[in-house]
Amino acid sequence: MPEIRIKRVYLAPDPADGFRVLVDRLWPRGLAKSRAAIDLWARDLAPSTELRLWFGHDPGRWAGFQKRYREELENQPDTLTAFHEAVAGQKTVTLLYAARDERHNQAVVLARVLSGRP
């Protein structure tokens, strides 16, 4: 598995990002696709619309969001397998997210899941 990093999609791309993967279900507002410089849009790995709306980036719901999102990911083994195949051979993969909150977003949870961390 490559090194997994996370970064806000609105920040300038950097060669150190390696393979850039957008993990939002919706395209980030006001961001041109050319400026985003993504290699893969993994919208199927993003939280469901229902979960995203329930969470609303409310830090008070963070624990519940993490639990529910992990459950969603566990129920998508084919999507996770496809992701692993897409990043095979990459040294670095940067998960990109649009949220303003750097600590409470789906990329944080997904990075832990992909790295096998709790």
Image (cartoon, grey):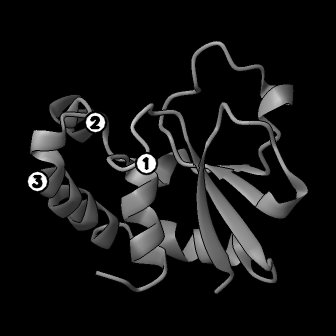
Amino acid beneath label 1 = Ala
Residue at the image position 26 percent from the left and 34 percent from the top:
57
- Residue highlighted by disc 2: 52
Query: Where does residue 62 sit, x and y in percent of width and height?
Result: 18, 49
Secondary element type, mark 1: loop
- Alpha carbon separation for disc pair 2 and 1: 9 Å
Query: Where does residue 59 sit, x and y in percent of width and height?
Result: 18, 41
48 sits left or right of 14 in the view? left
Marker disc for residue 46: 1
Amino acid beneath label 2 = Arg
Q: Residues within 10 Å of mark 3 (few under 14, many from 20)?
A: some
Residue at the image position 83 percent from the left and 40 percent from the top:
37
Q: Residues within 10 Å of mark 2 (few under 14, many from 20)?
A: some
Q: Quadrant of residue 28?
A: top right
- Residue highlighted by disc 3: 64
Reading the chain from its start, which is encountered first: label 2 or label 3?
A: 2
Query: Where does residue 3 sit, x and y in percent of width and height?
Result: 66, 79
Closer to us: 20 or 14:
14
Secondary element type, mark 3: helix
Instruction: Please say whether residue 44 is visible from this viewpoint.
Output: yes
- Indicate which label's residue lies in the foreground, 2 or 3: 3
